[in-house]
């Protein structure tokens, strides 16, 4: 890319959120007319790194050089004024307006809503023609395909003299039919010397479009590859931190232990996310769901929380088909969920947050009195959160680790048969994750069964007895976690990422 001018350089980028370090020594640079890619497994820090220049997540430390000038970007408005435009898969267009009205209705160029329809339509037509797109400027946005909505977003960016356009998980949402048109769109943007950054988790979707590829792992940039260096195995190895062997033979699907099934999903379908998914959880085991593409695990969490209903198939508890009508119904049936987003109540004290799940019913179906609640609260705080002055004062402590422990204690307060934990160490500092692992392992001593849903294979191997692999809404494999299987599981995980 030496023939182009460098328009962006990011070095030694650090981003903290409360006590959690999300990025540590990340870097990225971009040339005008270049299409660069940013890839990493889920929660590796991709969106956070781009957020340092889009204003979504201002960085804590590091150096950002834009058009040869050092800058610090703290808002989306500032980024757009500088010519840095961010496009997400969820459209920011206003459904009730036309294509032309959406393109020109920008605070950067207008003081209010445009009323001169003829001028609006003419300017929009010029931009659409420049991109070679046959869309009517008077079409309603809600009638457009996903690809055409992306084109309208690009037109908005060009109207605002964008020098850099960042597209986050846009490519993977495009249909096969749209990919060829998307390639032509990128070529037109190249011709305008616009720098493009494509952010994805799926390498097969990303590499055909990119001149260079930046690989993130656990908040660090661990590799920068030129197009001639692209190799799926090499990229995945950098993403996960270990080399893939030539022999990626699948670990044999292990037989489940001969114990009683506590919960079973049998041919469950949910929207386009789960497709006839089936697996069982046995009493007093810790089962992991390796959620390769993230969305399947979120759907399982919602179904077991009772806030969504399957479109088909059955959820069985101890062999009986059930319908979970909300979180209270799930709790009454012995299922307590620790969601990825902890859903704590800021107006409640620490103790009230913890015993909230137990305040309604117990396993015997009777109300707990205040003395029982106080004893339960004190016992859980002592066992899982310590007895320092802050906690004794009933204040809700800051920090993701404390909040996750609080959510964990709240689930325990319901005396569940099954605890479901979704991405339990998300946002938790790397050094503190072992604390969460120990809490999960403590469930077996209390004869509580656990289902751990995670995008991290290493996390699941640390705490689980078995791992069920779910990708694109289907179960691909089941593994028993033992020393003999660990390397096979790691190798197989790499192959899953290659197939995304």
Image: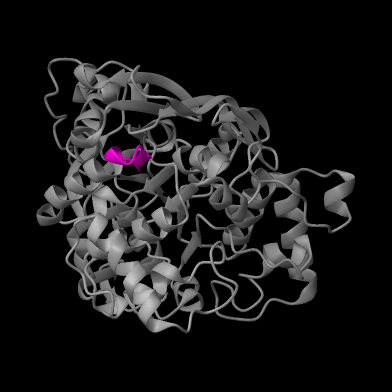
Q: Nearer the viewer, residue 94 or 214?
A: 94
- Let me know if residue 57 is in the magenta part: no
Residue 45 placement, left or right of 376: left
Of the 4 image quadrants, the one containing the C terminus is top left
Name the residue nearer the viewer: 351 or 209: 209
On the image, the x and y values in percent for residue 376 come to: 72, 61
Give how far across and how far down residue 415 sits, in percent: 56, 63
- Indicate yes or no whether the magenta region holds residue 195: yes
Whether residue 285 is visible? no
Q: Is residue 105 above or below residue 336?
A: below
Quadrant for residue 430, please give it.
Answer: top right
Residue 436 x/y as whole percent:
57, 40
Check the image and report above or below for 189 versus 217. Answer: below
Q: Quadrant of residue 207?
A: top left
First to last magenta residue range: 190-201
Viewer-nearest residue: 486 or 401: 401
Q: Tell me if I can see residue 398 in this picture.
A: yes
Residue 368 drawn above or below residue 408:
below
- x and y percent of residue 5 in the render? 42, 24
Name the quadrant of the N terminus.
Answer: top left
- Colouring method of the image: one colour
């Amino acid at each position: 890319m030496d023939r182009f001018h460098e328009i962006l350089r990011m070095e030694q980028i650090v981003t903290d959120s409360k006590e959690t370090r999300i990025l540590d020594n990340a870097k990225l640079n971009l040339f005008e007319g270049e299409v660069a890619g940013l890839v990493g497994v889920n929660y590796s820090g991709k969106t956070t790194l781009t957020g340092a220049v889009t204003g979504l997540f201002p960085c804590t430390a590091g150096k950002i050089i834009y058009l040869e000038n050092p800058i610090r970007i703290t808002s989306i408005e500032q980024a757009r004024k500088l010519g840095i435009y961010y496009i997400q898969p969820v459209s920011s267009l206003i459904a009730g307006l036309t294509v032309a009205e959406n393109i020109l209705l920008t605070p950067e160029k207008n003081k209010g809503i445009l009323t001169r329809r003829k001028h609006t339509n003419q300017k929009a037509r010029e931009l659409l023609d420049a991109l070679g797109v046959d869309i009517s400027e008077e079409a309603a946005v809600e009638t457009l395909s996903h690809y055409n909505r992306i084109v309208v977003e690009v037109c908005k960016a060009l109207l605002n003299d964008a020098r850099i356009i960042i597209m986050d998980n846009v490519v993977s949402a495009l249909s096969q039919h749209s990919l060829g048109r998307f390639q032509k769109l990128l070529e037109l943007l190249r011709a305008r010397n616009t720098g493009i950054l494509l952010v994805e988790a799926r390498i097969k979707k990303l590499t055909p479009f990119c001149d260079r590829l930046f690989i993130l792992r656990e908040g660090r940039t661990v590799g920068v590859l030129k197009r001639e260096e692209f190799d799926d195995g090499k990229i995945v190895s950098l993403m996960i931190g270990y080399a893939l062997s030539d022999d990626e033979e699948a670990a044999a699907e292990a037989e489940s232990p001969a114990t009683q099934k506590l919960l079973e999903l049998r041919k469950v379908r949910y929207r386009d996310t789960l497709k006839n998914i089936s697996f069982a959880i046995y009493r007093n085991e810790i089962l992991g769901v390796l959620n390769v593409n993230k969305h399947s695990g979120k759907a399982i969490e919602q179904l077991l929380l009772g806030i969504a209903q399957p479109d088909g198939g059955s959820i069985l508890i101890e062999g009986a088909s059930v319908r979970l009508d909300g979180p209270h119904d799930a709790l009454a049936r012995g299922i307590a969920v620790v969601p990825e987003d902890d859903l704590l109540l800021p107006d409640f004290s620490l103790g009230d947050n913890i015993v909230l799940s137990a305040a309604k019913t117990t396993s015997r179906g009777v109300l707990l009195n205040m003395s029982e609640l106080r004893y339960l609260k004190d016992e859980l705080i002592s066992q899982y959160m310590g007895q320092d002055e802050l906690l004794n004062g009933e204040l809700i402590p800051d920090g993701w680790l404390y909040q996750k422990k609080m959510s964990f204690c709240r689930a325990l307060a319901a005396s569940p048969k099954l605890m479901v934990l979704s991405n339990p160490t998300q946002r938790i500092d790397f050094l503190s994750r072992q604390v969460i692992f120990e809490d999960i392992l403590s469930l077996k001593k209390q004869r509580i069964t656990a289902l751990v849903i995670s995008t991290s294979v290493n996390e699941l191997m640390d705490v689980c007895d078995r791992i069920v692999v779910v990708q694109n809404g289907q179960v691909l494999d089941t593994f028993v976690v033992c020393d003999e299987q660990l390397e096979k599981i790691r190798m197989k995980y790499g192959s899953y990422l290659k197939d995304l």
